[in-house]
Image: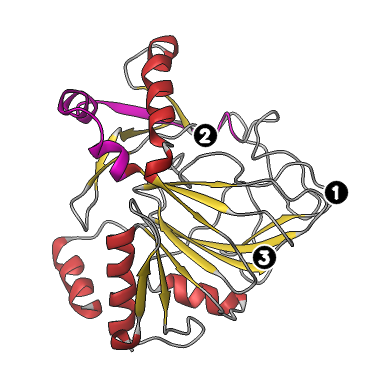
Amino acid sequence: MSQSLQIRRLAGALGAEISGVDLAQELPDAAIAAIRQALLDHQVIFFRDQALTPAQQVTFGARFGPLNIHPYVAGMADHPEVMEVVKEPEDRTNFGGGWHSDMSFLQRPAIGSILYAVETPEFGGDTLFASQAAAFEALSPGLQATLEGLNAVHSAAREYSSQGHSAQKRKSMAIAEADGLVGEYIHPMVLTHPESGRKALYVNPAFTLKIEGWKTSESKALLDYLFQHCRYEGFTCRFSWRPGSVAFWDNRSVWHFALNDYPGQRRHMRRVTVDPWPVQAPAAAARRAQAVS
């Protein structure tokens, strides 16, 4: 199966389209390994002409790690891991309509997201992706060294507040507002990818509140500079959806932005989100690595 995969690069910084695989099938380990390697190489990968039931999407996603159940967005009744991202014609705001990295507001953030298109508008509704590895590599050595010594505070409190973009009411999505127990978590501002070893910036406008140990006002100038730098067009690729399309991106090194440019039309997507494997003792981790190799 892995030998039949065809990979076509889409942009200079990130992104590749993969053909020759049916994600609805029970894929052999070699095919999963090839897809994983393509994700590492290209940071976001795309598939066309797939036909996935929610159960099949769950099965595919679970090959890469345990699946997340979103703390604020209700999943499907039979498949709580599957988030239905729907914008009805009468909705004004979409979900994911700003640059962000999924779930960075958690203590152990998600490592990947898999989005499947059920219904797409006649025009518009593309998703933009930005390589945070390319963004880090474009910085001066001095700023790189400075950022590698800093951590940032992440939280859902702002984005999922009553005024936050993500918590706005949408006809076909059940979204809870963050309450006082939402929590704040500290993550390095530069992540070294545990599989590829490539370094990437790890801050985002939606969930990064400030730099650890700095005042919010002190943090603002540097974070605003990084947020502007990180979405430079040369670090991005753009994906046009059609029903049956799939995007799989690495949240450890990729931002994304769902465009809201299709007024009066319906867009229906399904997402599963892959969490990191639980921390294991060395012997158990070695056994799991051997089992999937």
Residue behind mark 1: 90
* Of marks 1 and 3, the one in the foreground: 1
Asked whether residue 152 is drawn in magenta, I would say yes
Say what secondary structure mark 2 lies in.
Answer: loop
* Of marks 2 and 3, the one in the foreground: 2
Image quarter (top left, top right, bottom left or bottom right) of the N terminus: bottom left
Density class for disc 2 (Cα within 10 Å; few <14, some 14-19, many ≥20) is many
Which of these two is toward me, 116 or 129? 129
Nearer the N terminus, badge 2 or badge 3? Answer: 3
**Vertical comparison of 133 with 8: above or below:** above
* Of marks 1 and 2, the one in the foreground: 1
- Left or right, 67 with respect to 291, comes to right
Asked whether residue 55 is drawn in magenta, I would say no
Residue 18, which numbered label? none
Say what secondary structure mark 1 lies in.
Answer: loop
User: Could you tell me which residue is drawn at 65 percent across and 54 percent down?
Assistant: 125
Say what secondary structure mark 3 lies in.
Answer: loop
Q: Which residues are magenta?
A: 133-159
Visible residue check, residue 49: yes
Residue 149, percent from left and from top = 20, 26
Amino acid type at circle 3 is Met
Amino acid type at circle 1 is Glu
Residue behind mark 3: 76
Residue behind mark 2: 206
**How far apart in space, not on screen, are marks 1 and 3 (Cα)?**
22 Å
Amino acid type at circle 2 is Ala
Density class for disc 1 (Cα within 10 Å; few <14, some 14-19, many ≥20) is few
Residue 43, percent from left and from top = 35, 57
User: Could you tell me which residue is drawn at 16 percent across and 27 percent down?
Assistant: 145
Nearer the N terminus, badge 1 or badge 2? Answer: 1
Which of these two is toward me, 135 or 216? 135
